[in-house]
Amino acid sequence: MNIKATLRKARLAIGKAILDSKNTDLILSEIPNKILFLRHDGKIGDYVVSSFVFREIKKQSPQTQIGVVCSQKNRYLFENNPYIDKLYLVKTKSIPDYIRGGKQLAKEQYDVVIDPTVTLRNRDLLFLRTISAKHYVGYQKQKYRLFDLNVEDRKQHFSEIYQDALALIGFENIETQYDVPLNATSNQSIKHYLYENQIRNYIALNLFGAGSARRFSEQKINELLSCLKQHSDKPIVLLTFPEVTAKLCSFTKKYKNIFVYEKTKSVFDSIELIRFADLLISPDTATVHIASGLSKKIIAFYSSDEQNFIHWHPNNQAETHILRFRKSVNDLDFAAIKPEWLK
Protein backbone atom coordinates (compact mmCIF):
# COMPACT_ATOMS: atom_id res chain seq x y z
CA MET A 1 0.00 0.00 0.00
CA ASN A 2 1.50 3.38 -0.99
CA ILE A 3 1.76 6.41 1.29
CA LYS A 4 -1.23 8.18 -0.28
CA ALA A 5 -3.50 5.15 0.22
CA THR A 6 -2.22 4.69 3.79
CA LEU A 7 -2.97 8.32 4.68
CA ARG A 8 -6.42 8.07 3.10
CA LYS A 9 -7.19 4.95 5.11
CA ALA A 10 -6.02 6.69 8.29
CA ARG A 11 -8.19 9.75 7.57
CA LEU A 12 -11.25 7.57 7.04
CA ALA A 13 -10.59 5.65 10.26
CA ILE A 14 -10.22 8.87 12.28
CA GLY A 15 -13.34 10.35 10.69
CA LYS A 16 -15.32 7.20 11.40
CA ALA A 17 -14.20 7.21 15.05
CA ILE A 18 -15.42 10.80 15.45
CA LEU A 19 -18.57 10.80 13.30
CA ASP A 20 -19.94 7.26 13.41
CA SER A 21 -22.32 7.01 16.36
CA LYS A 22 -25.32 4.78 16.97
CA ASN A 23 -28.47 6.40 15.68
CA THR A 24 -31.36 4.39 17.14
CA ASP A 25 -32.43 1.34 19.12
CA LEU A 26 -35.86 1.42 17.48
CA ILE A 27 -36.94 -1.38 15.15
CA LEU A 28 -38.61 -0.40 11.88
CA SER A 29 -41.97 -2.14 12.24
CA GLU A 30 -43.91 -0.72 9.29
CA ILE A 31 -43.40 0.72 5.82
CA PRO A 32 -41.91 4.22 6.28
CA ASN A 33 -43.91 7.37 5.56
CA LYS A 34 -40.87 9.29 4.32
CA ILE A 35 -37.87 7.84 2.46
CA LEU A 36 -34.80 9.78 1.32
CA PHE A 37 -32.34 8.58 -1.33
CA LEU A 38 -28.85 10.08 -1.55
CA ARG A 39 -28.00 10.33 -5.25
CA HIS A 40 -25.90 13.51 -5.53
CA ASP A 41 -22.96 11.53 -6.95
CA GLY A 42 -25.11 9.34 -9.19
CA LYS A 43 -24.69 9.15 -12.96
CA ILE A 44 -27.08 8.04 -15.70
CA GLY A 45 -26.16 4.35 -15.36
CA ASP A 46 -26.68 4.43 -11.58
CA TYR A 47 -30.03 6.11 -12.11
CA VAL A 48 -31.26 3.55 -14.64
CA VAL A 49 -30.37 0.44 -12.61
CA SER A 50 -32.12 1.86 -9.53
CA SER A 51 -35.01 3.55 -11.36
CA PHE A 52 -37.52 0.88 -10.35
CA VAL A 53 -37.31 1.74 -6.64
CA PHE A 54 -39.41 4.89 -6.91
CA ARG A 55 -42.12 3.09 -8.91
CA GLU A 56 -42.22 0.09 -6.58
CA ILE A 57 -42.46 2.22 -3.43
CA LYS A 58 -45.42 4.17 -4.80
CA LYS A 59 -47.05 0.99 -6.12
CA GLN A 60 -47.10 -0.60 -2.67
CA SER A 61 -47.37 2.53 -0.54
CA PRO A 62 -48.78 5.52 -2.48
CA GLN A 63 -48.77 7.69 0.64
CA THR A 64 -45.03 7.31 1.23
CA GLN A 65 -43.17 10.51 0.41
CA ILE A 66 -39.99 10.03 -1.64
CA GLY A 67 -37.19 12.59 -1.48
CA VAL A 68 -33.95 12.55 -3.46
CA VAL A 69 -30.72 14.42 -2.75
CA CYS A 70 -29.07 15.30 -6.06
CA SER A 71 -26.71 17.87 -7.55
CA GLN A 72 -27.30 20.58 -10.11
CA LYS A 73 -25.36 18.39 -12.54
CA ASN A 74 -27.62 15.33 -12.29
CA ARG A 75 -30.98 16.82 -11.29
CA TYR A 76 -32.19 16.37 -14.89
CA LEU A 77 -32.38 12.64 -14.20
CA PHE A 78 -34.84 13.05 -11.34
CA GLU A 79 -36.84 16.24 -11.89
CA ASN A 80 -39.43 14.72 -14.22
CA ASN A 81 -39.83 11.41 -12.44
CA PRO A 82 -43.54 11.16 -11.52
CA TYR A 83 -42.83 9.04 -8.42
CA ILE A 84 -40.43 11.46 -6.73
CA ASP A 85 -42.07 14.02 -4.45
CA LYS A 86 -39.19 16.32 -3.61
CA LEU A 87 -35.64 17.09 -4.73
CA TYR A 88 -32.92 18.60 -2.54
CA LEU A 89 -29.86 20.10 -4.21
CA VAL A 90 -26.38 19.99 -2.70
CA LYS A 91 -22.98 20.99 -4.00
CA THR A 92 -20.94 17.80 -4.25
CA LYS A 93 -17.75 17.65 -2.17
CA SER A 94 -18.68 20.89 -0.34
CA ILE A 95 -18.63 20.32 3.41
CA PRO A 96 -20.33 23.67 4.23
CA ASP A 97 -23.13 22.85 1.78
CA TYR A 98 -23.45 19.31 3.17
CA ILE A 99 -23.93 20.82 6.64
CA ARG A 100 -26.46 23.33 5.29
CA GLY A 101 -28.33 20.65 3.36
CA GLY A 102 -28.20 18.19 6.24
CA LYS A 103 -29.75 20.71 8.65
CA GLN A 104 -32.49 21.46 6.11
CA LEU A 105 -33.21 17.74 5.73
CA ALA A 106 -33.22 17.21 9.51
CA LYS A 107 -36.27 19.50 9.67
CA GLU A 108 -38.06 17.18 7.21
CA GLN A 109 -37.82 14.29 9.73
CA TYR A 110 -37.23 11.44 7.29
CA ASP A 111 -37.97 7.95 8.55
CA VAL A 112 -35.37 6.24 6.36
CA VAL A 113 -32.27 7.28 4.42
CA ILE A 114 -31.02 4.85 1.76
CA ASP A 115 -27.39 5.25 0.70
CA PRO A 116 -25.68 2.21 -0.89
CA THR A 117 -22.35 4.01 -1.42
CA VAL A 118 -19.59 1.43 -1.04
CA THR A 119 -16.87 3.71 0.39
CA LEU A 120 -18.00 6.57 2.62
CA ARG A 121 -15.77 9.62 2.84
CA ASN A 122 -15.76 11.63 6.04
CA ARG A 123 -17.82 14.41 4.46
CA ASP A 124 -20.44 11.82 3.43
CA LEU A 125 -20.64 10.47 6.97
CA LEU A 126 -20.97 14.02 8.32
CA PHE A 127 -23.80 14.70 5.86
CA LEU A 128 -25.62 11.50 6.84
CA ARG A 129 -25.37 12.26 10.55
CA THR A 130 -26.59 15.83 10.09
CA ILE A 131 -29.78 14.59 8.35
CA SER A 132 -30.86 12.95 11.65
CA ALA A 133 -33.11 10.32 10.07
CA LYS A 134 -34.74 7.63 12.22
CA HIS A 135 -33.14 4.79 10.25
CA TYR A 136 -30.24 4.41 7.82
CA VAL A 137 -29.90 1.69 5.17
CA GLY A 138 -26.41 1.05 3.79
CA TYR A 139 -24.48 -1.51 1.79
CA GLN A 140 -21.63 -3.42 3.47
CA LYS A 141 -21.96 -1.13 6.50
CA GLN A 142 -22.06 -3.81 9.21
CA LYS A 143 -19.09 -2.13 10.89
CA TYR A 144 -20.86 1.25 11.04
CA ARG A 145 -23.00 2.13 14.05
CA LEU A 146 -24.98 4.80 12.19
CA PHE A 147 -26.47 2.25 9.79
CA ASP A 148 -29.01 0.14 11.67
CA LEU A 149 -30.05 -1.66 8.46
CA ASN A 150 -27.43 -3.21 6.21
CA VAL A 151 -27.51 -4.89 2.80
CA GLU A 152 -24.97 -7.69 2.87
CA ASP A 153 -22.61 -8.39 0.01
CA ARG A 154 -23.73 -11.57 -1.76
CA LYS A 155 -22.04 -10.74 -5.04
CA GLN A 156 -25.24 -9.23 -6.41
CA HIS A 157 -25.94 -6.79 -9.24
CA PHE A 158 -26.39 -3.20 -8.09
CA SER A 159 -30.09 -3.34 -8.96
CA GLU A 160 -30.38 -6.23 -6.48
CA ILE A 161 -28.66 -4.13 -3.82
CA TYR A 162 -31.50 -1.61 -4.16
CA GLN A 163 -34.02 -4.45 -4.18
CA ASP A 164 -32.51 -5.78 -0.93
CA ALA A 165 -32.62 -2.27 0.58
CA LEU A 166 -36.36 -2.01 -0.12
CA ALA A 167 -36.92 -5.47 1.35
CA LEU A 168 -35.22 -4.36 4.58
CA ILE A 169 -37.79 -1.59 5.04
CA GLY A 170 -40.87 -3.71 4.37
CA PHE A 171 -41.40 -3.88 0.61
CA GLU A 172 -42.08 -7.26 -1.01
CA ASN A 173 -42.47 -8.76 -4.51
CA ILE A 174 -40.36 -5.99 -6.03
CA GLU A 175 -40.27 -5.81 -9.82
CA THR A 176 -36.85 -4.64 -10.98
CA GLN A 177 -37.59 -3.74 -14.60
CA TYR A 178 -35.86 -0.41 -15.26
CA ASP A 179 -37.79 2.79 -15.98
CA VAL A 180 -35.82 4.39 -18.82
CA PRO A 181 -36.56 8.15 -19.09
CA LEU A 182 -38.50 9.33 -22.12
CA ASN A 183 -38.05 12.95 -23.14
CA ALA A 184 -40.86 13.94 -25.51
CA THR A 185 -38.82 16.55 -27.38
CA SER A 186 -35.91 14.16 -27.98
CA ASN A 187 -38.32 11.39 -28.94
CA GLN A 188 -39.94 13.50 -31.66
CA SER A 189 -36.62 14.89 -32.90
CA ILE A 190 -35.09 11.42 -33.28
CA LYS A 191 -38.20 10.04 -34.97
CA HIS A 192 -38.01 12.90 -37.47
CA TYR A 193 -34.26 12.39 -38.02
CA LEU A 194 -34.64 8.66 -38.66
CA TYR A 195 -37.58 9.18 -41.02
CA GLU A 196 -35.87 12.00 -42.91
CA ASN A 197 -32.73 9.90 -43.46
CA GLN A 198 -34.67 6.67 -44.04
CA ILE A 199 -32.77 4.90 -41.26
CA ARG A 200 -34.34 1.71 -39.95
CA ASN A 201 -33.22 -1.62 -38.46
CA TYR A 202 -29.94 -0.02 -37.48
CA ILE A 203 -27.08 -0.61 -35.07
CA ALA A 204 -26.48 2.04 -32.39
CA LEU A 205 -22.72 2.21 -31.79
CA ASN A 206 -21.20 3.96 -28.81
CA LEU A 207 -17.43 4.43 -28.99
CA PHE A 208 -16.70 6.35 -25.80
CA GLY A 209 -17.21 5.28 -22.21
CA ALA A 210 -16.17 6.93 -18.96
CA GLY A 211 -12.39 6.99 -18.57
CA SER A 212 -9.63 6.54 -21.12
CA ALA A 213 -9.73 2.72 -20.84
CA ARG A 214 -13.19 2.74 -22.39
CA ARG A 215 -12.47 5.12 -25.27
CA PHE A 216 -11.57 3.74 -28.69
CA SER A 217 -8.62 5.20 -30.58
CA GLU A 218 -9.13 6.34 -34.16
CA GLN A 219 -7.31 3.27 -35.44
CA LYS A 220 -9.53 0.97 -33.38
CA ILE A 221 -12.69 2.80 -34.50
CA ASN A 222 -11.70 2.11 -38.09
CA GLU A 223 -11.07 -1.54 -37.26
CA LEU A 224 -14.46 -1.90 -35.60
CA LEU A 225 -16.36 -0.14 -38.38
CA SER A 226 -14.61 -2.27 -41.02
CA CYS A 227 -15.51 -5.41 -39.07
CA LEU A 228 -19.17 -4.40 -38.75
CA LYS A 229 -19.39 -3.42 -42.41
CA GLN A 230 -17.88 -6.73 -43.45
CA HIS A 231 -20.48 -8.77 -41.55
CA SER A 232 -23.62 -6.61 -41.74
CA ASP A 233 -25.35 -4.29 -44.17
CA LYS A 234 -27.36 -2.61 -41.42
CA PRO A 235 -27.05 1.18 -41.07
CA ILE A 236 -24.90 2.29 -38.14
CA VAL A 237 -25.75 5.33 -36.02
CA LEU A 238 -22.81 6.60 -33.97
CA LEU A 239 -23.91 7.87 -30.56
CA THR A 240 -22.29 11.19 -29.80
CA PHE A 241 -22.00 14.17 -27.48
CA PRO A 242 -21.02 17.73 -28.45
CA GLU A 243 -17.28 17.35 -27.71
CA VAL A 244 -16.81 14.43 -30.15
CA THR A 245 -19.45 15.12 -32.82
CA ALA A 246 -17.02 16.69 -35.32
CA LYS A 247 -14.61 13.77 -34.94
CA LEU A 248 -17.36 11.19 -35.44
CA CYS A 249 -18.72 12.99 -38.49
CA SER A 250 -15.42 12.32 -40.26
CA PHE A 251 -16.26 8.60 -40.27
CA THR A 252 -19.54 9.24 -42.11
CA LYS A 253 -17.46 10.51 -45.03
CA LYS A 254 -15.22 7.44 -44.97
CA TYR A 255 -17.89 4.73 -44.74
CA LYS A 256 -21.26 4.28 -46.40
CA ASN A 257 -24.47 4.03 -44.41
CA ILE A 258 -22.99 5.48 -41.22
CA PHE A 259 -24.78 8.34 -39.50
CA VAL A 260 -24.29 10.81 -36.67
CA TYR A 261 -27.15 12.79 -35.16
CA GLU A 262 -25.24 16.07 -35.09
CA LYS A 263 -27.88 17.89 -33.03
CA THR A 264 -27.28 15.61 -30.04
CA LYS A 265 -27.35 17.79 -26.93
CA SER A 266 -28.09 15.41 -24.06
CA VAL A 267 -28.30 11.79 -23.01
CA PHE A 268 -32.01 11.88 -23.84
CA ASP A 269 -31.15 12.03 -27.55
CA SER A 270 -28.95 8.95 -27.18
CA ILE A 271 -31.69 7.16 -25.24
CA GLU A 272 -34.09 7.65 -28.16
CA LEU A 273 -31.52 6.46 -30.69
CA ILE A 274 -31.10 3.30 -28.61
CA ARG A 275 -34.87 2.96 -28.22
CA PHE A 276 -35.38 2.67 -32.00
CA ALA A 277 -32.26 0.56 -32.70
CA ASP A 278 -32.09 -3.19 -33.29
CA LEU A 279 -28.81 -3.53 -31.43
CA LEU A 280 -26.46 -1.55 -29.20
CA ILE A 281 -22.69 -2.02 -29.31
CA SER A 282 -20.93 -0.20 -26.48
CA PRO A 283 -18.07 -0.11 -23.93
CA ASP A 284 -20.11 2.30 -21.80
CA THR A 285 -22.15 0.84 -18.93
CA ALA A 286 -24.63 3.73 -18.93
CA THR A 287 -25.78 3.01 -22.49
CA VAL A 288 -25.68 -0.73 -21.77
CA HIS A 289 -28.10 -0.24 -18.85
CA ILE A 290 -30.33 1.94 -21.02
CA ALA A 291 -30.43 -0.76 -23.70
CA SER A 292 -31.13 -3.39 -21.02
CA GLY A 293 -34.05 -1.33 -19.75
CA LEU A 294 -35.39 -1.17 -23.30
CA SER A 295 -34.77 -4.93 -23.83
CA LYS A 296 -32.47 -4.33 -26.79
CA LYS A 297 -29.90 -6.78 -28.14
CA ILE A 298 -26.44 -5.84 -26.84
CA ILE A 299 -22.79 -6.42 -27.63
CA ALA A 300 -20.95 -4.97 -24.63
CA PHE A 301 -17.26 -4.50 -23.88
CA TYR A 302 -16.31 -4.95 -20.21
CA SER A 303 -13.00 -4.89 -18.38
CA SER A 304 -11.64 -7.98 -16.64
CA ASP A 305 -12.44 -6.36 -13.25
CA GLU A 306 -14.72 -9.07 -11.86
CA GLN A 307 -16.14 -7.02 -8.98
CA ASN A 308 -17.17 -4.25 -11.37
CA PHE A 309 -18.73 -6.82 -13.69
CA ILE A 310 -20.73 -8.42 -10.87
CA HIS A 311 -22.23 -5.05 -9.90
CA TRP A 312 -22.74 -3.56 -13.37
CA HIS A 313 -23.12 -6.35 -15.95
CA PRO A 314 -26.02 -6.08 -18.46
CA ASN A 315 -29.14 -7.12 -16.56
CA ASN A 316 -30.84 -7.82 -19.86
CA GLN A 317 -33.72 -10.03 -20.98
CA ALA A 318 -32.72 -9.76 -24.65
CA GLU A 319 -29.81 -11.43 -26.46
CA THR A 320 -26.53 -10.20 -24.99
CA HIS A 321 -22.90 -10.85 -25.89
CA ILE A 322 -19.92 -9.67 -23.87
CA LEU A 323 -16.27 -9.26 -24.83
CA ARG A 324 -13.75 -8.63 -22.04
CA PHE A 325 -10.56 -6.57 -22.13
CA ARG A 326 -7.68 -6.30 -19.66
CA LYS A 327 -6.36 -2.74 -19.77
CA SER A 328 -8.20 -0.94 -22.55
CA VAL A 329 -10.91 -1.42 -25.16
CA ASN A 330 -8.12 -0.86 -27.66
CA ASP A 331 -6.82 -4.33 -26.76
CA LEU A 332 -10.00 -6.00 -28.09
CA ASP A 333 -9.91 -8.42 -31.01
CA PHE A 334 -13.01 -7.72 -33.10
CA ALA A 335 -12.65 -11.07 -34.85
CA ALA A 336 -14.48 -12.40 -31.78
CA ILE A 337 -17.67 -10.64 -32.96
CA LYS A 338 -19.71 -13.31 -34.74
CA PRO A 339 -21.75 -12.29 -37.82
CA GLU A 340 -24.93 -13.80 -36.32
CA TRP A 341 -24.69 -11.38 -33.38
CA LEU A 342 -25.35 -8.51 -35.79
CA LYS A 343 -28.59 -9.86 -37.28
Image (tube, helix red, strand yellow):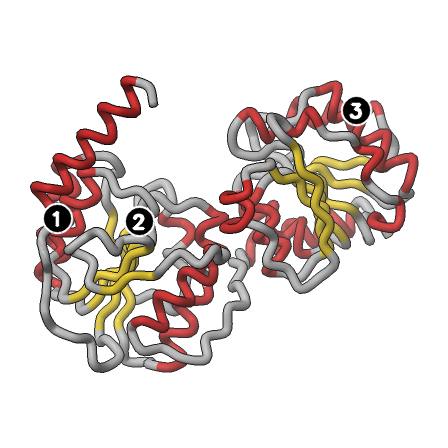
Using the numbered discs, state the Cα–Cα distance from disc 3 to disc 2 in whole angstroms: 39 Å
Q: Position of residue 182 (x, y in %)?
A: 54, 59
Query: Which SS class for mark 1?
Result: loop
In the image, residue 335 sits, relative to residue 31, either above or below, namely above
Q: Quick check: can you spot residue 225?
A: yes
- Residue farthest front in this picture: 1
Which circle, 2 or 1, is nearer the viewer? 1
Q: Quadrant of residue 95?
A: top left
Residue 247, placed above or below residue 241: above
Residue carrying label 3: 222
Q: Please give left or right for residue 58 compared with residue 331 in the image.
A: left
Q: What x and y, as percent, mark residue 41?
A: 34, 43
Q: Whole-Å distance between the Cαs marked 2 and 1?
A: 23 Å
Q: Position of residue 248 (x, y in %)?
A: 69, 27
Amino acid type of the residue tagged 2 in the rendering? Cys
- Comes first in the chain, label 3 or label 1: 1
Amino acid bearing label 3: Asn
Circle 1 packing at 10 Å, graded few (<14), some (14-19), many (20+), is some
Q: Nearer the viewer, residue 82 or 263?
A: 82
Disc 3 on helix, strand or loop?
Answer: helix
Q: Which mark is residue 70?
A: 2
**Local SS, label 2:** strand
Residue 339: x %, y % from top left: 89, 45
The residue carrying mark 1 is 20
